Image: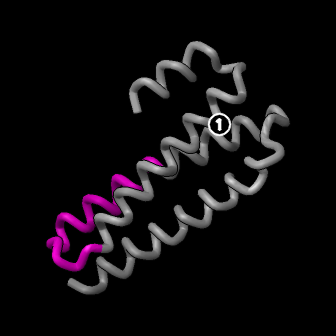
Amino acid sequence: MTIAEQRANPDALNAWAQAELAISYSKLADAYCTSASNLNNSNTRRRSDLLAAQSVYQKSLSVWEQLRAKGAVQGVDADKPKAVADALLKCQESLRALGKSR
């Protein structure tokens, strides 16, 4: 992740680098969600994974929102901000459900 962040940060006007960063964040969050869905993991581990996923989804969504504000979300990326927002909501729902299962 650090490489993508370094590439995008100094080049904040480069929409491609920013979109790649947002996509990378989303993929990392997806991996945390996959780990959190493993019922063999403890609830503590699953909660930790979901909290990490939530944080990274929020970073991804923030980048997409910045790009959208610049009018730089288009083409194949047009649906990605909504997909990330939906994944964030699902993650938050899973966190709430896990809290109730204690």
Q: Quadrant of the N terminus?
A: top left
Pointer 1 residue: 19
**Where does the image place residue 25, in percent across and percent down from the top left?**
48, 44
Mark 1 Cα within 10 Å, few/some/many (few <14, many 20+)?
many
Figure check: 10 above or below 85: above
Which residue shows up at 45% across the image and 67% down it?
91
Q: How many marks?
A: 1
At a point 38% along the width and 64% down the height, the residue shown is: 33
Task: Specify the farthest residue to the bottom.
Answer: 101
Quadrant in the picture for the C terminus: bottom left
* Magenta segment: 38-56
Q: Quick check: 2 above or below 60?
A: above
Residue 99: % across, % down: 29, 77
Q: Residue at x 51, y 71 (%)?
A: 90
Tell me where residue 44 appears, x and y as whole percent. Answer: 17, 67
Q: Residue furthest front?
A: 76
Could you tell whether 44 is left or right of 33 in the image? left
Is 100 located above or below residue 56 in the figure?
below
Does the magenta run of residues contain 52? yes
Q: Amino acid at mark 1?
A: Ala
Q: Main secondary structure of the magenta part?
A: helix
